[in-house]
Image (cartoon, rainbow, N blue to C red):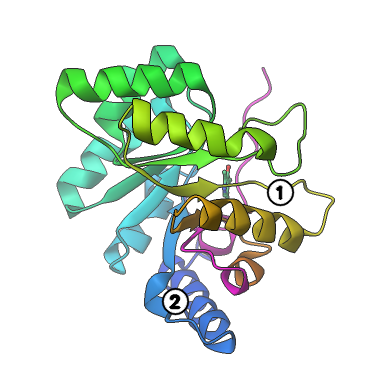
Amino acid sequence: MTDQSYDGAAQLADVNEAILQAAKTVDRDPGEVSLVAVSKIHGVERIRPVLQAGHRLFGENRVQEAEQKWPQLRQDFGDVTLHLIGPLQTNKVKAAVATFDVIQTLDREKLARALAKEFARVDKHLPVYIQINTGEEPQKAGILPTDADAFIALCRDELQLEVCGLMCIPPVDEEASLHFALLAKIAARNGLTGLSMGMSADFETAIAFGATHVRVGTAIFGSRPKPPLK
Ligand SMILES: *Cc1c(COP(=O)(O)O)cnc(C)c1O
């Protein structure tokens, strides 16, 4: 899969520059916006150039894939921070806590309890983001906006989780800014500062609405190979 036309360092630089400009436009400090480079599906040969360019913050959406790719990359590059940005099944909690540094997709009570238990068992307390289903899409994971305040309280007060913010994935066919604004509003009224929102197509808009973490895959690594047919 070597690809002569892929220049990870240049694409990373372009995205960093776009983040800088987007922040400037709305008078935000660009230092408040972290770029989570989403390397899912891509092989290590596409990830290494981005690490070599100095980037250290990455996102993966599958536990098993991250377990295969990242131990070696961590060994070779050090101080990598890896966020889980995909759905987490409770039977994968142990592996996820061992593999990731931040869980962005806390989306139900059963998972919150399983994470709290595993954090205590291994004495490793990962920061978490709560995923909000801002579009109230039945097929999509996440806490409904009306349930958000109670769920945040459960996670923080009862389960003592380190909740640093909220994340959302807006419906594909709707104006993303409405969802970014809603996420920011729920976070603000709960005293949360972290906002993980915005992907390749809309990260600049997300920054205008207060994103602290943008999750960008395609704009850095190129389009993803299609998974093999099952
Ligand atoms: C794949 C993915 C991204 C990155 O999407 P791009 O459009 O490639 O930037 C961001 N967030 C989540 C949750 C994803 O699954």
Residue tagged 2: 13
Query: In the drawing, does residue 226 fall left or right of residue 80?
Result: right
* Residue found 51% across the figure and 47% down from its top: 166
Mark before the other along the chain sequence, 2 or 1: 2
Residue 216 seen by the camera: no
What segment is highlighted magenta in the picture? Answer: 207-230
The secondary structure type at the circle numbered 1 is loop
Decide: is 189 above or below 149. below
Q: What's the residue type where badge 1 is placed?
A: Pro
CB under 8 Å between callouts 2 and 1?
no
Of residues 13 and 103, the one drawn nearer to the viewer in this rendering: 103
Disc 1 residue crowd, few under 14, some 14–19, many 20+, Cα 10 Å: many
Residue 217 in magenta stretch? yes
Task: List x then y, in percent, for residue 28.
Answer: 48, 81
Q: Position of residue 208 (x, y in %)?
A: 61, 74
Magenta residue check for 151: no
Mark number, residue 170: 1
Q: Is 194 on the left or on the right of 202, as rendered? A: left
Q: Residue at x 32, y 64 (%)?
A: 55
The answer to which image quadrant residue 158 occupies is top left
Which residue sits furthest top? 91
Label 2: element kind: helix
Which residue occupies 61% across, 57% down?
A: 185
For the residue with label 2, is its CB less than 8 Å from the closest atom of ligand 1? Answer: no
**Residue 116 percent location from the top left of the image:** 31, 23
